[in-house]
Amino acid sequence: MTAHVGERLLTPGEVAGLFRVDPKTVTRWATAGRIGSIRTPGGHRRFRESEVKTLLAELTTEAGGQG
């Protein structure tokens, strides 16, 4: 996967809002390797918007197929 120069980075809170989960859940996913994250110089996690949207699409497709 290639990162686009200037690609928007999302905070755990923003990612949590998209998935409708707690921000701590997003942090656990990153720790488990379920979603990639980048560390800022201050030690905060940031997530690539493209990667988040890809995961969201995969999970939405999976959930829709189980009906």
Image (cartoon, rainbow, N blue to C red):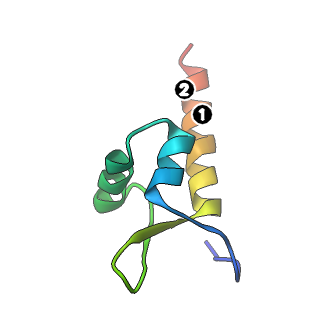
* Residue lying at 47% horizontally and 46% vertically, measured from the top left: 16
In which quadrant of the rendered image does the C terminus lie?
top right
Q: 48 above or below 15?
A: below
SS label for mark 1: helix
In space, the residues marked 2 and 1 are separated at their CA atoms by 5 Å
Residue 61 image position (x, y, % from top left): 62, 33
Residue corresponding to mark 1: 60
Residue at the bottom extreme? Answer: 41
Residue 43 image position (x, y, % from top left): 33, 78
SS label for mark 2: helix
Q: 18 above or below 42?
A: above
Callouts 2 and 1 close, C-beta under 8 Å: yes
Say which mark, if any, is on residue 63: 2
Q: Residues within 10 Å of mark 2 (few under 14, many from 20)?
A: few
Instruction: Give the amino acid at mark 2.
Output: Ala
Residue 25 image position (x, y, % from top left): 34, 46
Label count reads 2
* Residue lying at 29% horizontally and 61% vertically, measured from the top left: 31
* Residue lying at 39% horizontally and 86% vertically, measured from the top left: 41
In which quadrant of the rendered image does the N terminus lie?
bottom right
Instruction: Give the amino acid at mark 1.
Output: Thr
